Image (tube, grey):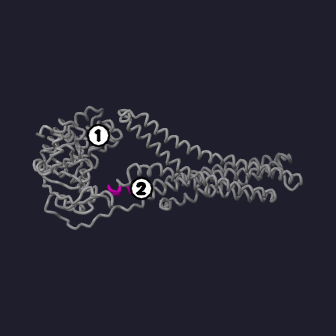
């Protein structure tokens, strides 16, 4: 929580004004029972009409002043909370941008989204409620006890017994219920996961006829959540009856003692009413304190999760041993693992690429194809070994320079909620429509874009869901081509295309660009015409032409033959 509160700098005045106005409001509330007591004694019992008018006017003035103080406190507290959390959000967002791909993979996208949304809301509510109640509730409770003592010392002994009992009851209930709320949230998370999987996997569920199994699983999770919620609810439900019993017994004792004191002439009837009001104020504030404890506990837990991300140090860049290479592109003894101490995805990989060469990359699922491309594009740093582009060590190239050299078309492209034109020209300036249309033609994407209402100005829905998988891949290829890069990477970008469309796109790309071309594919048919093929297996790289690999590598030969059975004979 300390890390989060550091962002309150610049808003310190708000952090002072909010509780200050709440304290003024609390002070006015403590005066009201005394005025009511005087109103009863002088105005009602004493029959003094002028006193009634004067005292009612005082109450109206106090009510108006209290309203102004309350609204001011709410405003300052809300502004302080929003201002602080907005700075935390910006800092957390900036932190995510500074993290390496390895760190982002380890943290996970859903976790970061939760930190930026639900956890931020929890912290904001915690700050807001704390500024309003942290000082107000103790002041009202302590002040009510002092004022009750001033009204009548002997009658206030009831407070000396009641208030500790109320505090004990409230905090015992909170002590047992707060940990249970955490368990409820954990089980709720499991329920949400089950719902999400059943919705996103609806077609698979129906295809395999496992609706009943999924329904039974959901019932079990839901039953577990319900039972826990009921258990917590029963404990929390004790709050009002337990405190109500204690207060009602205290009120009965207060009235009994008060009646005796009034009959003896020590205090007035108005004093008994004042004591009753102070008792009610104490009850209300203790219940508010219980709510504050729950909210602050949740906020503290959320702040802890936010701090975990903020405290992550950006990945340190390795020292550059060899700044240059004699080769246009070179992987020199490159080893990479996603987690420290885990099995390397790529182990001592070496190969060279000449300018303008076409390189095919193939291997089984999990062999490291996308990892190799990620290293080439500078997404990851090699654990050992070196990578060179245009004769320079990748580690010596800035992000901007590297992004101009290497352009990647992904297998699962990210399309933003922008127009097609804006999606294609992200990161570029002053791009003519002619260039955009030319890149769309090359990617065989112009026809379906023109069919959309608005054409280039058609807005992509979230994730590009108003386009098919193959259409999204072709838009990604067009976006990569538009940058006219030195190195063009197609990371399994034909996986959702039919053979005819794929062949047409590959032919157009070869006509339009002289870039060094990397084609990642699961199909040997997509890379047959490449100058070199890199076959990845068990972290090792085997480099050669198609015919060379057919002769020298049995695994590659088996993959090819299973796809071209007619060549088996």
Label count reads 2
Kind of element beneath mark 2: helix
Residue drawn at x 34%, y 53% as measured from the top left: 105
Residue that mark 2 sits on: 92
| Spot occupied by residue 211 in the image (x, y as percentages of width and height) | 42, 34
Q: Which residues are magenta?
A: 94-103
Q: Nearer the viewer, residue 214 or 238?
A: 214
Choose mark 1 or mark 2, whichever is in front.
Answer: 2
* Main secondary structure type of the part rendered in magenta: helix
Q: Look at the image and say whether residue 97 sits in the magenta stretch.
A: yes
Residue that mark 1 sits on: 420
Q: Nearer the viewer, residue 556 or 430?
A: 556
In the image, is residue 371 above or below residue 502?
Answer: below
- As drawn, the residue found furthest toward the right would be 264
Is residue 390 shown left or right of residue 44? left
Residue drawn at x 89%, y 54% as measured from the top left: 264
């Amino acid at each position: 929580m300390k890390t989060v509160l550091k962002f309150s700098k610049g808003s310190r005045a708000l952090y002072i004004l909010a509780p200050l106005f709440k304290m003024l409001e609390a002070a006015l509330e403590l005066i009201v029972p005394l005025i009511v007591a005087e109103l009863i004694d002088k105005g009602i019992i004493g029959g003094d009409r002028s006193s009634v008018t004067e005292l009612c006017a005082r109450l109206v003035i106090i009510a108006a002043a209290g309203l102004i103080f309350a609204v001011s406190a709410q405003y300052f507290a809300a502004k302080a909370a929003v201002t602080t959390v907005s700075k935390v959000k910006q800092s957390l967002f900036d932190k995510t941008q500074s993290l390496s791909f390895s760190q982002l993979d380890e943290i996970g996208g859903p976790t970061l989204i939760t930190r930026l949304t639900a956890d931020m809301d929890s912290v904001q509510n915690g700050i807001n409620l704390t500024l309003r109640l942290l000082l107000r509730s103790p002041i009202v409770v302590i002040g009510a006890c002092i004022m009750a003592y001033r009204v009548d010392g002997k009658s206030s002994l009831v407070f000396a017994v009641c208030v500790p009992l109320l505090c004990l009851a409230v905090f015992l209930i909170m002590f047992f219920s707060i940990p249970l709320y955490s368990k409820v949230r954990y089980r709720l998370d499991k329920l949400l996961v089950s719902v999400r999987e059943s919705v996103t996997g609806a077609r698979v569920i129906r295809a395999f006829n496992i609706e009943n199994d999924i329904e039974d699983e959901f019932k079990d999770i839901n039953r577990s959540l319900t039972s826990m919620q009921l258990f917590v609810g029963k404990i929390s439900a004790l709050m009002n009856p337990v405190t109500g019993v204690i207060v009602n017994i205290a009120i009965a004792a207060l009235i009994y003692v008060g009646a005796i004191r009034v009959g003896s002439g020590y205090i007035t009837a108005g004093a008994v009413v004042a004591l009753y009001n102070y008792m009610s104020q104490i009850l209300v504030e203790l219940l508010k304190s219980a709510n504050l404890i729950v909210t602050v506990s949740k906020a503290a837990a959320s702040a802890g999760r936010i701090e975990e991300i903020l405290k992550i140090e950006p990945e340190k860049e390795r020292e550059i041993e060899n700044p240059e290479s004699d080769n246009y592109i070179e992987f020199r003894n490159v080893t990479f693992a996603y987690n420290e101490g885990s099995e390397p995805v790529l182990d001592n990989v070496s190969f060279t690429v000449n300018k303008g060469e076409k390189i095919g990359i193939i291997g089984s699922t999990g062999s490291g194809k996308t990892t190799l491309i990620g290293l080439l594009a500078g997404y990851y740093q090699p654990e050992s070994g070196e990578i060179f582009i245009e004769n320079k060590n990748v580690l010596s190239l800035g992000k901007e320079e590297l992004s101009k050299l290497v352009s990647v078309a992904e297998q699962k492209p990210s399309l933003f909620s922008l127009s097609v034109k804006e999606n294609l020209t992200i990161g570029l300036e002053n791009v003519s429509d002619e260039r955009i249309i030319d890149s769309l033609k090359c990617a065989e994407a112009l026809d379906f874009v023109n069919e959309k209402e608005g054409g280039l100005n058609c807005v992509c829905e979230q994730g590009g869901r108003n386009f098919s998988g193959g259409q999204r891949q072709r838009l990604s290829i067009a976006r990569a081509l538009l940058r006219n890069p030195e190195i063009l990477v197609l990371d399994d970008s034909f996986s959702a295309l039919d053979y005819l469309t794929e062949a047409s796109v590959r032919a157009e790309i070869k006509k339009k660009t002289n870039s060094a071309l990397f084609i990642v594919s699961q199909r040997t048919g997509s890379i047959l015409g490449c100058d070199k093929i890199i076959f990845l297996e068990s972290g090792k790289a085997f480099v050669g032409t198609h015919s060379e690999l057919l002769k020298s590598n049995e695994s590659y030969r088996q993959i090819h033959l299973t796809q071209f059975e007619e060549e088996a004979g």
